[in-house]
Every structure is written in structure tokens, then in C-alpha cells.
Image: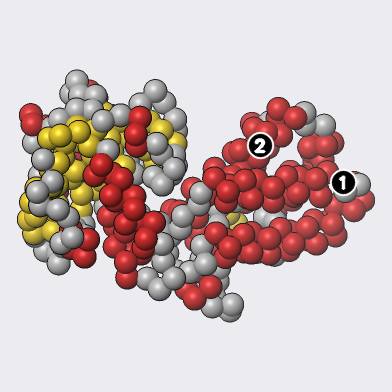
Amino acid sequence: MEELINQIEGQVQFNRGKNLLCKEPLNPFGFSPCLTSYINEHLFELKILNTGQQEILFTHLVNKSIEALCEANQFYHFNTVDRIALRKIYQKLHHQITSLSAHQIEQGLQHIAKGHYQALQSWIKRSNPFVKSLYSPTMAYLEQEVVCGEYSAPMQLKLLQIDMAHLPEPILDIGCGKQAFLVNYLRTMGLEAYGIDRNATASPFIYQADWFEFDLSTKSWGSIISNIGFSNHFQHHHLRVNSDYLGYALRYKQILQSMKAGGVFYYAPDLPFIEKHLDTAKFGIQKTAIKGTQFSRTKIVRL
């Protein structure tokens, strides 16, 4: 099972047009040579995977596919419904492959691969309609990257000008990143910190969750932090045609409401188009310019 996951993992890396496991060029209408070879050699094992093993495989494929897509373009957004739809695509793929007989594999895989790729294209266009205008029909599927990175805890604290000695608890990092550097650092300093991220590995204090679907009402937050995360995406949707601007505006309001009195929301980049509408009787706003950029950092205190 582990070998199968390792072999398939390279195939689901959409970004950069490469099979990252085998380092071979990836034909979008054909499986990579290493995956094809694996299927040829292990078709019987694929056919006899039990229900539990199939669930592990499909979950892994969905998670790695979405992770790879979001690494290529951080503004992709996938909710629970999208994940369920993607899971069905991989279930269908498994069924098609395991329905082949040994002498059908070569020709059958070519046909299956093309249909699978087209199904993935249709899925991402439904889940993220903006790709229809972002990528032309003749462009390599993910030729343009909008990458995101993870930053060290000291760098984030410095950029947002956070004084840990005056950081109300509990603390929530929205979009903490796969490695959750800031959350882990704060916890080593004895602070009650939690994080959410769509690509994070779940733990008692890290939630693998979409920031739209995470239940903010479960705690009365002392501090909420989002460095080049939520506000960056909100800014993107504010500027984009056919965007989810209203969804982000509603979530922004919910974030502020989830803070207890005296709670603080730190984020960058700033959001002047919505910050100007905040009730100054309820929220104190502090903004300072980020040197070398056109943006500012924002600190909002719930009064």
C-alpha cells in the first residue's frame, strides 16, 4: 500500500509539468512511465485492495492533489463539496484501472488517462471558475504559477510587529502553513496557540481545515494572526472579476466577532477597502507601512 501511494504521488503533482517523483516529463494525456510500469506489475494487488485500503488511497490522492494545486496557485480554493467531487474522480479512476485485463493495460491506460485528465480539468473549472479566463485552452495547464511560501516564526512576528509579552490567549493562526512554524514556536514559548490550514497535518492543536469551514465559535479568541494569508486572498478577491468578495467580507466580520473583548487581529497585507467601514466605537485600528512595499500591516483590537 505504501509503495502504491509513493508511486502515485508523483502523478498527482500538477504543478511545473513534471513528475516530481520520477523526474520524467509528464504527458497530461498519459500517465507517467513509472506509474504505468507500476500498474503493469501490480494490477492484481490493485484489484484486491479492501475497502479500508481504498479509503486510505483516495484520501491521500485528494489531499496531495489539492496540496499540489495550491502550491502552484495559492488562490485556488476547494471546499468540502469540491473534495467529495475529486474523491469520486479518483474512485472512478481506480475502478477503470482495475477493470482492465492484463492484455488491455497499454491501450486501456492511454484511454483512461485522457478521460481522467479531462475530468480533472472540468472539476477545477467548476470549483474555481476564474481559471477559464486565467488559462487559455492552448496554454500548458498550470504554466503560470502563483506560489506561496512558509515563513519563519521570527520573521512573521517582526513583520506584524507582534510583542509576545502582550499577546492575549488563546491564539489562532489562520493559514498557518503546512509546517505551522509560528504555532509551534508560540507553543514552545508556553503560549496556547492553534492553527488552521488546508494542507496542515492534523494534531491536537493544528486543524486541517478550510478557513471558511472552520468553526470560529468554538473559542473566544484572544489573538488571531494571519500573515500573508486570509487578507492576501481577500485582497485578491476584491480585485478579481467573478470573485467571492462577499464570502470573504462575511468571514472577515465573523473573525472579528470571534474575538473576546481586548482581543487582537494581526494581519498583512492591509485591507483598506473594508477597514474604512469598521465601527470605531467597537474596534481600534492601528496601521503601519511595511518598508519597501505599498502595503501596511494592520492590528485591530476589539474594544
Q: Quadrant of the N terminus?
A: top right
Q: Residue 144 location, x and y as percent?
A: 44, 69
Which residue appears at 34% of the width and 44% of the height? 175
Q: Is residue 179 above or below residue 291?
A: above
Residue at mark 2: 57
Q: What kind of residue is marked 1? A: Ser
User: Is residue 26 visible in the rendered structure shown here?
Assistant: no
Residue at mark 1: 99
- The secondary element bearing badge 2 is classed as helix
Which residue appears at 24% of the width and 48% of the height? 227
Classify residue 53 as left or right of residue 220: right
User: Among all residues in the image, which is located at the extreme top?
Assistant: 190
**Sequence order check, earlier mark of 2 and 1:** 2
Q: Quadrant of the C terminus?
A: top left
Q: Residue 238 location, x and y as percent?
A: 32, 66
Q: Nearer the viewer, residue 78 or 284?
A: 284
Q: Nearer the viewer, residue 155 or 298?
A: 298
Numbered mark located on residue 44 in the image: none
